[in-house]
Amino acid sequence: MALESNTVRLPSDLGSWVLFPGNIKHDPVYLVGSQQIDKYLTVPAERHSLVLRIFAQLQQGATPAEVEVALRVEGLEVNVDEFCRMLAQKRLLEWESAASDVSEPAKATFFGQLRALSWQVFSLNLEKLHPILAKLATPLTILLGLFVILSTGGVLAQGWISTTALRTTARQVLENRGLLWMALFNLFLIPIFVFLHEAAHTVVAALGGVYPRRLSLRLYLLVMPYFSLQLPGLYTLPLSNRFLTMAAGPLMDLALGNLCLLTARAIGGEGMAWLALIALNNYGRFLFNILPIMPMTDGYALLSQAVFREIDIRGHATQEFRRWRQKQANTFKGKYVAFYLLNLGIGIFIIVGGLVQVNMLLLGWLRKTTLLPVGPSAWLIYPALGLLNVIGLYLARKRLRLLVGW
């Protein structure tokens, strides 16, 4: 049955949750939306009751125009028509009058480009696992906590981790096994650890009644494997449960690194080099996942919400910076300046550090294959590497601009 042009249809599970509780400095911030659709609207405390009233009247069959007239009688000037169009863009309501104006926004975000340049290996529907997760969430979370505490305690009991020693030991694998072994390592072994990272998120989220919908394995640029986990309703969890869910993945990375390091120290021999490489990989992903810069990291989500009380502080900081740079705003200050400088500094560190590591690996490989020039022409390799770096940065400039927020 076709909808009337001014009639709207809302999701049946439309609800409201506390996104950020109030404190001395801030009022509460609410989340209004649908867990089934996994689309939400953040609403400040002063507008929360008004938004709920509008939703209630729309659910009772009133048109946006009728709701606007009723509010105007009470002295409230609200553009309900524009509000409904914004909700239609978020897919939180169906409205034929807005259908011609609603189109899928262009995805120039990090996530959009990541997905566009990825190839899906497989995608699993996880909804049948919900009853199992509901029963096992508590014991598995306790087991994860013990795993993290005991493994970290075991590493600290044997002395602090020596990054230099780890890198030296792991490099033995690179030098002795070559690029083919490393490619197989990246394609088949690393996804197992990434899967365990996502499984930790899933188990802890299930404690609060939030369950995964779909898990996909994708290959970025057909080379780098990563998992994409749909966890609808994550932001409807209470703040403490939400933070614990976000932290569960990096804690799993840390525990896996600890386990591999302890095993390497125990067995020695050639297996020690492989386990050191795996430990280094897990520690690297732990550090990457707690970095408060990339929108895909858990550290970003924790920093954005715990410190700045925003789901996407990076997006707002970038928007404010662009407005200031284009002279649309007179100031660029406060929490956005602090985050933007942090974002910029870590981004440059990652870029420079990544280039240094790539160049060192390439030089090592060239020395091993005796392809490096010798004699007076040996210095030519460095400007050649510099030129390759410049070309690589130029080709990746759009991704780098997303990384540092330009």
Image (spheres, helix red, strand yellow):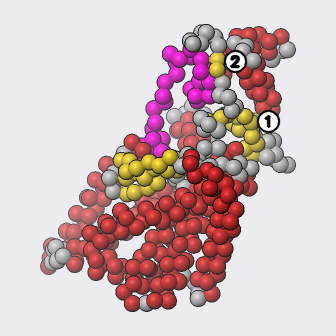
**Residue at image x 39%, y 90%?**
269
Spatial separation of the CA atoms under disc 1 and disc 2: 19 Å
Query: Which SS class for mark 1?
Result: helix
In-front residue for pair 42/196:
196
Residue highlighted by disc 2: 80
In-front residue for pair 337/235:
235
| Quarter of the view holding residue 174 | bottom left
Residue 247: x, y in percent?
A: 63, 61
Q: Tell me: residue 132, above or below residue 18.
A: below
**Residue at image x 78%, y 32%?**
48
- Sequence-wise, the earlier of marks 1 and 2 is 1
Instruction: Name the amino acid type tagged 1.
Output: Ala
Residue 172: x, y in percent?
A: 34, 82
Q: Tell me: residue 210, above or below residue 190.
A: above
Instruction: Name the amino acid type tagged 2.
Output: Val
Residue 205 in view, yes or no: no
- Residue 126 in magenta? no
Residue 187 in view, yes or no: yes
Asked if residue 157 lies left or right of residue 268, the reply is right
In-front residue for pair 251/20:
251
- Residue 94 in magenta? yes
Q: Are marks 1 and 2 in contact (CB under 8 Å)?
A: no
**Residue at image x 49%, y 78%?**
260
Query: Which SS class for mark 2?
Result: helix
Q: Which mark is residue 45?
A: 1
Q: Which residues are magenta?
A: 85-113
Residue 217: x, y in percent?
A: 43, 53
| Quarter of the view holding residue 286 | bottom right
